[in-house]
Image: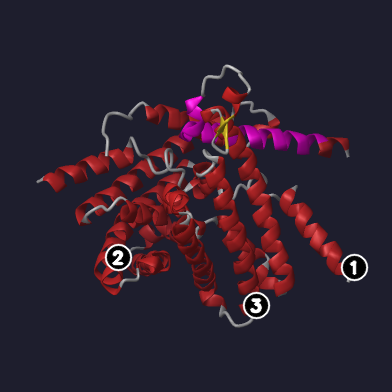
């Protein structure tokens, strides 16, 4: 019961108070480059939720049932990245076979995800914070949703921004970072709501 | 010989100036933001990145004729991960406090787009010597930007430099801008930095 409650708390904390993008700065590269369009942001965001939840769970199993018994914790970086890359490849092949519409919507984003640092980051945080199995899964799921939320909000804002007059030097990455900073400030309003 | 020196010089000027990985190509932003709240941690982190880019670029270049094109990305990732593990173990053994504070960001050097980007864009098509120089140059280009940002964030956020209470020592009344060491401050600081640098570049372009 206790761990179940903790898992729920972790889930909400990962979305709001400890948002992986806005407080841990992870996944910035794809966030900055993809958030130009709402449609592509939606596709990438959905793919991130799915991959993050699955790989955090898979990496938990690999770490606790393979690496620790063998005493190979130091190799976790290599193993985690291989698990993520293999999983993404597998999902890509399955989606291609099963549904063409889904492949058209998500397929192009999957290769991008392997190099999204947020995915590896979630697995590394899970090890450092010593989460249990359910907690790891909920943390991955929550972080994915938090990332989705942030990129969708940003895509919406950038859509409006196209008509705005931005100082020349700030165009592109600069103004996006300023807005991200404001979003991070806004999300700080949630802090204190849940503490993990 | 002079052709090589000219090439080396060109690599360095582009990595430090116009093609800087951080403010011109907007790569490796995650760690740029995450570790720059304390100057000391930033220095350790940048040294780790310089070590990794230099040697992984060199290794990828050495193996470039033996890596099959299909598994190229995977092979590069494994080479990078090997060097990151060396950095991680080294920090754990000799600088355990900093290793703890940097947390997952040492491991995340693997997904730092600068390293992968240099391996893809340069090491695959150039010899090992030049690749080594190129890796070193982009590592330095990344490092100095981080160090400047970290300097201002620590100074304004905690009123210290390298842990030394500079404002207290100079008897200047100073209230810490705690926002600077938190997440929003990092975003604003990088945005301002990019703004200033781009402004300078734009002006130079207009002049010429």
Reading the image, the residue beneath label 3 is B62
Crowd around label 2: few <14 · some 14–19 · many ≥20 (10 Å): many
Q: Main secondary structure of the magenta part?
A: helix
Reading the image, the residue beneath label 1 is B2
**Residue B188, percent across and down?**
56, 31
For numbered disc 3, what is the local secondary structure?
helix
Could you tell me if the residues under marks 1 and 3 are in contact, i.e. CB atoms within 8 Å?
no
Which residue is drawn at the image coordinates 21% and 57% (left, top)? A133
Q: Which mark is drawn over residue A63?
A: 2
For numbered disc 1, what is the local secondary structure?
helix
Can you say which quadrant of the picture contains the C terminus of chain B? Answer: top right
Let me know if residue B119 is in the magenta part: no
Mark 2 and mark 1: Cα distance apart in space:
52 Å
Can you say which quadrant of the picture contains the N terminus of chain B? Answer: bottom right
Can residue A130 be seen from the camera position used here? Answer: yes
Q: Residue furthest top?
A: B173
Mark 1 and mark 3: Cα distance apart in space:
23 Å
Residue B15 in the image: above or below residue A176: below
Could you tell me if the residues under marks 2 and 3 are in contact, i.e. CB atoms within 8 Å?
no
Give the chain of mark 2.
A
Give the magenta range: B177-203
**Residue B164, percent across and down?**
57, 34
For numbered disc 2, what is the local secondary structure?
helix
């Amino acid at each position: 019961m206790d761990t179940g409650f903790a898992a729920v708390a972790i889930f909400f904390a990962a979305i709001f108070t400890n948002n992986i993008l806005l407080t841990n700065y992870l996944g910035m590269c794809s966030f900055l480059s993809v958030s130009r369009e709402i449609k592509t942001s939606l596709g990438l965001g959905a793919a991130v939720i799915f991959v993050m939840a699955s790989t955090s769970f898979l990496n938990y199993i690999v770490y606790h049932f393979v690496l620790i018994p063998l005493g190979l914790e130091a190799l976790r970086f290599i193993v985690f990245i291989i698990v993520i890359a293999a999983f993404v490849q597998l999902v890509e092949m399955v989606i291609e076979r099963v549904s063409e519409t889904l492949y058209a919507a998500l397929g192009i984003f999957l290769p991008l995800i392997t190099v999204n640092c947020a995915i590896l980051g979630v697995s590394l945080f899970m090890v450092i914070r010593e989460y249990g199995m359910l907690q790891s899964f909920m943390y991955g799921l929550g972080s994915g949703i938090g990332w989705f939320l942030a990129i969708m909000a940003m895509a919406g804002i950038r859509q409006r921004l196209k008509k705005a007059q931005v100082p020349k030097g700030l165009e592109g990455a600069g103004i996006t970072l300023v807005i991200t900073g404001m979003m991070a400030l806004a999300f700080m309003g949630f802090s204190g709501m849940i503490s993990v | 010989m002079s052709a090589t020196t000219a090439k080396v010089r060109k690599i360095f000027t582009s990595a430090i100036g116009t093609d800087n990985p951080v403010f011109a190509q907007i790569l490796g932003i995650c760690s740029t933001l995450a570790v720059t709240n304390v100057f000391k941690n930033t220095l350790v982190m940048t040294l780790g990145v310089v070590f990794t880019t230099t040697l992984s670029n060199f290794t990828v270049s050495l193996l470039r004729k033996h890596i099959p094109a299909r598994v190229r990305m995977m092979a590069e990732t494994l080479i990078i991960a090997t060097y990151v593990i060396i950095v991680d173990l080294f920090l754990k053994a000799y600088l355990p406090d900093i290793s703890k504070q940097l947390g997952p960001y040492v491991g995340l050097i693997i997904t730092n787009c600068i390293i992968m980007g240099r391996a893809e864009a340069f090491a695959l098509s150039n010899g090992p010597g030049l690749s080594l120089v190129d890796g070193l140059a982009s590592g330095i280009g990344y490092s100095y930007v981080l160090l400047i940002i970290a300097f201002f964030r620590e100074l304004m956020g905690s009123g210290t430099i390298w842990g030394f209470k500079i404002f207290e020592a100079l008897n200047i009344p100073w209230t810490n801008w705690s926002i600077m060491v938190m997440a929003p401050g990092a975003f604003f600081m990088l945005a301002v930095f990019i703004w200033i640098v781009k402004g300078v570049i734009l002006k130079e372009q207009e002049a010429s």
